[in-house]
Image: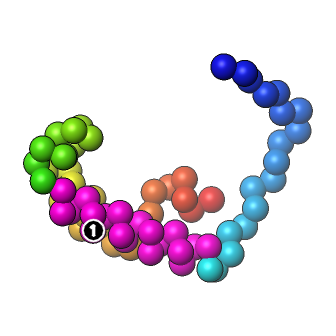
Amino acid sequence: MTQIAIKQHCKPQRRSLLSSLLDSLSLLRQRQTLARLDDRALEDIGITRQQAEAEASRSIWDAPEFWQK
């Protein structure tokens, strides 16, 4: 595996409103899909039904922290 050295830090860019909206809609679709998975599929990805239901029930505005940068 090749590593690339970066000599200067990149400033984080502000996300556009459209980008934020599209990400939120994508997150909503992902959570809806997660809620529809059967127990075997959930086992394959290493989460329980309770974890899946808890994630699926989160608000659309409750995005992972790394999305909020």
Q: Disc 1 marks which amino acid?
A: Gln
> Considering the numbered disc 1 on the image, is that residue within a helix, a strand or a loop?
helix
Q: Quadrant of residue 31?
A: bottom left
Q: Which residue is mark 1?
A: 32
| Quadrant housing the C terminus | bottom right
Looking at the image, residue 37 lies above or below residue 58? above
Residue at left offset 53%, top offset 74%: 22
Residue at left offset 81%, top offset 53%: 11
- Residue 62 located left or right of residue 9: left
Front in this rendered view, residue 3 or 6? 3
Relative image position of residue 49 (x, y in whole percent): 13, 51
- Residue 56 located left or right of residue 6: left
Relative image position of residue 3 (x, y in whole percent): 74, 23
Relative image position of residue 61 (x, y in whole percent): 43, 73
Q: Give the magenta-colored segment's residue range.
A: 19-37
Residue at left offset 84%, top offset 33%: 6
Query: Is 32 contained in the magenta span?
Result: yes
Residue at left offset 44%, top offset 75%: 25
Relative image position of residue 32 (x, y in whole percent): 27, 68
